[in-house]
Amino acid sequence: MSKQGNPNSFLRTIILISTFGGLLFGYDTGVINGALPYMSEQLGLNSFTEGLIASSLLFGAALGAVFGGRLADYIGRRQNILYLAVLFFVAALGCTLAPNTTVMVIFRFLLGLAVGGASVTVPTYLAEMSPAESRGRMVTWNELMIVGGQLLAFVFNAILGNTMGDNSHVWRYMLFIASLPAIFLFFGMLRVPESPRWLASKGRNKDALSVLQKIRAEKQAKSELREMEAALAEETEMKTATFKDLAIPWMRRILFIGVGVAIVSQATGVNSIMYYGTEILRDAGFQTSAALIGNVANGVISVLATLVGIWLLGKVGRRPMMLTGLTGTTSMLLLIALFSQILEGSAALPYVILTLTVTFLAFMQGAIGPVLWVTLSEIFPLRLRGLGMGMSVFFLWITNFVIGLMFPILLEKIGLSSTFLVFGVIGVVSIFFMRKHFPETKGLTLEEIEHYFRNFDQGTQADLKAVGSQTETHLK
């Protein structure tokens, strides 16, 4: 037993508090969905400035993801999350009080730095605090908090839009709510300890043991510290990969797959729905108040599908999940393009579009989303993990940024049908790319995955399955 009460209870408290970073991530990316129509009227936005306001957060997130991980290595995971909570709060207030487009873009960019930093620091902190046997479940809790934050944003948008829709400042209230979880995150993080692995990496082994004794049984705490010390000793001797190492074919291939998966996951156009769902439903024929209510369905299905996706990860292979998800999302995109053309001006169109976007999100959040993050955590060997994850997450956010910037412009210039046809064509290309390059990694250790990439320069799925079969035989 721990020195300070029930270790499991304290660990649950740590997980709840730290994943408010994920909640903020979700709320701040989702709130613009409902705020934008009202903001456009008061700030006099056009399609380009709408895209700029929505996407400036995403550009900030790309930089925040790159530098946030390095800062967390330097000052500690807990300290970094504390700083991020302050940045979330200040940036949310700045957006709330913004008098013009320029100020709004600046504070949305700062908010993006916080979102990007949280996207890499919170999962790292969770992974290092969690026991090995439940690490996957605890880390995916953050993913659930992200979509939960988006759902909360959609719900508050709908409530405020329908009760205060005649108030020209209603969008400011929507944005202000984002500052409240930041306060909870800051004061909550003051009560939780630093990551024991980070403490051990700085030679503070006594402090690391003290933290472990609060969240593990006594025997497990001491055993885990010894494992950390051994792993850190190996890492000290290991040379970290640099860009020069990408001259090695198998390393280059892993990075190619990691970046490819990151780009494909965003090129589905998922965040055109998460950021502009209200605009899409208005364009289809709903009034703003009805569109805000309809958009809540997108948030609900995202949460439910994420829960299903987390369960499926333990039952189904990564490759069939990814290919099924891409087939489903691409089909929905092409159907949106088709029906928005056939039913243009019809009273049925907004309901058809809502049904298709909800189904799209079921495939996206239930299959592609969970596989994306698990794959990125699995395919990179230790020496390549920093460079590989950094590059992959950077390209993920940059793809997100380009889509966020271009979507309202495309919607204005070529219309709803043609815009989704473009996403549908990209989806078809993505399916072929994933069929050719995406490996099956379920059931393999990290070492076996690395062995596969090292030894099969032009490896096939059969090769990797053979490795998996050998593993199962060995375990039996």
Image: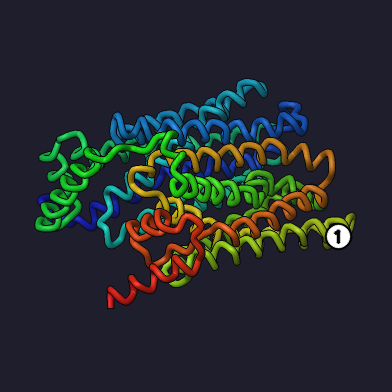
Amino acid, disc 1: Ala
| Residue 25 falls left or right of residue 468 | right
- How many numbered discs, if any? 1
Q: Where on the picture, by quarter, is residue 76?
A: top left
Residue closest to the eye, 158 or 190: 190
Q: Where on the picture, by quarter, is residue 50?
A: top right
Q: Is residue 339 above or below residue 74?
A: below
Residue 318's x, y, as percent? 49, 64
Residue 143's x, y, as percent? 46, 53
- Image quadrant for the N terminus? bottom left
Which residue corresponds to the image point at 58% horizontal and 46% vertical from the top-left?
A: 263
Residue closest to the eye, 439 or 261: 439
Residue position for label 1? 347
Which residue corresponds to the image point at 82% horizontal and 39% vertical from the top-left?
A: 412
Way the structure is coloured: rainbow
Which residue corresponds to the image point at 74% horizontal and 39% vertical from the top-left?
A: 408
Is there any visible trace of residue 270 in the rendered image?
Answer: yes
Residue 66's x, y, as percent? 45, 33
Q: Is residue 40 above or below residue 343?
A: above
Decide: few, some or many residues near mark 1? Use Cα within 10 Å; few <14, some 14-19, many ≥20.
Answer: few
Which residue corresponds to the image point at 32% horizontal and 57% vertical from the top-left?
A: 447
- Image quadrant for the C terminus? bottom left
Element carrying mark 1:
loop
| Residue 270 falls left or right of residue 372 | right
Residue closest to the eye, 56 or 383: 383
Is there any visible trace of residue 181 in the rendered image?
Answer: no
Residue 460's x, y, as percent? 51, 64
Q: Where on the picture, by quarter, is residue 329?
A: bottom right
